[in-house]
Image (spheres, helix red, strand yellow):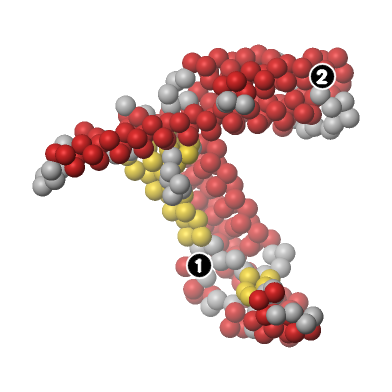
Amino acid sequence: MLSDRVMLVSLNISQWTGRKMDKDISAEVTTRHGAVREAGNFTKKLISEEPTFKAIQTIATEARQLHYTLTLPYSLEGTRMLANRVYDDYTRKMRALRDRFDMAISDFIGEYPRIKRDARNKMGDMYNEDEFPAEHKLRDLFSWEVSIIPLPSGDQLDKIIGVMQDEIENIKTQLEEKYQSGMKKGFADLWERLYDVVQRASEKLNDPKAIFRDSLIGNIKELCSLLPKLNISDDDSLEKMRIEVLKQLCADEADDLRKNKDLRKEKGKAARKLCDAMGKFMGQ
């Protein structure tokens, strides 16, 4: 059962934007240009090029990227599937990022009085003290929540008291449809990930003038090491393709491909063939 192999996970991070729409300046600009008020708005950057603030944003972006990398799509509401085989990696890395997030917020708050002084000097007449949150309220403007729950099982519904059996069966049917939809989305997502990194390699390697970094091959290796954990249905066709991609494209280092034109051409052709083969599984 799918519920034996995956859990449901959601990640919600909120943060103060450090921006504020100024109605007065917006009206001034539109009037000056003879435009209607709805033509545009002027948004002020209350904090400009502040390293401690950017650090918070960077960590939040890293967390979202990790979340999408280690999970599979499940619902339109943002809930994703977390394979049991990835649980330890996910929670360990998320905890480390959360610690960095909290520390970055503390650093930002520690610099906040100085940041406000800098903003006053940079913004001139646009500075408005009321647009800056009070220091004691700053931390409440940042939040981080990871929610992991079991995937609902149809067997659990049989224990519900006070619901007609027909209704229970109807809910079970809906759950099964949701499972199947989730499996289909997850399966398609993995094929798309593999196709994307191989296609990128094909484009670069088949263009003699294209410049590429070590990550071109490194990203393929990284994904191929992760796929067995994310392949929750243990699909044989995906596993065979993963092995073939490793064999065809990852036996040589990126630097070898840059130095050896013939080898680069050979691997470029291999990448193109792999893309064609994957396209058949993806309906392309």
Q: Residue 222, image x and y in percent? A: 61, 28
Instruction: Looking at the picture, tell me which residue is in the foreground, 182 or 61.
Output: 182
Question: Quick one: label 1 or label 2, which is nearer the N terminus?
Answer: 1
Residue under the image location 68 percent in, 61 percent down: 51
Q: Please name the residue that numbered disc 2 is placed on.
A: 264
Where disc 2 sits, the SS reads helix
Q: Residue 211, image x and y in percent? A: 84, 33
Amino acid type at circle 1 is Leu
Q: Residue 269, image x and y in percent? A: 77, 17
Residue under the image location 84 percent in, 27 percent down: 207
Where disc 1 sits, the SS reads helix
Binning the other alpha carbons within 10 Å of mark 2 as few (below 14), some (14 to 19) or many (20 upward) gives many
Q: How many marks?
A: 2
The quarter in which the N terminus is drawn is top left
Residue under the image location 35 percent in, 35 percent down: 177
Q: What label sits on residue 141 in the rendered view?
A: 1
Q: Residue 34, image x and y in percent? A: 78, 82
Task: From the viewer's perspective, tell me whether residue 284 is left or right of residue 1.
Answer: right
The quarter in which the C terminus is drawn is top right
Q: What label sits on residue 244 in the rendered view?
A: none
Amino acid type at circle 2 is Arg
Give the quarter of the image for residue 221: top right
Query: Mark 1 to mark 2: distance in Å?
Result: 50 Å
Does residue 100 lie above or below 1 as drawn?
Answer: below
Does residue 248 lie above or below 111 as drawn?
Answer: above
Does residue 250 lie above or below 200 as drawn?
Answer: above
Instruction: Looking at the picture, tell me which residue is in the foreground, 107 or 254.
Output: 254
Residue under the image location 67 percent in, 80 percent down: 37
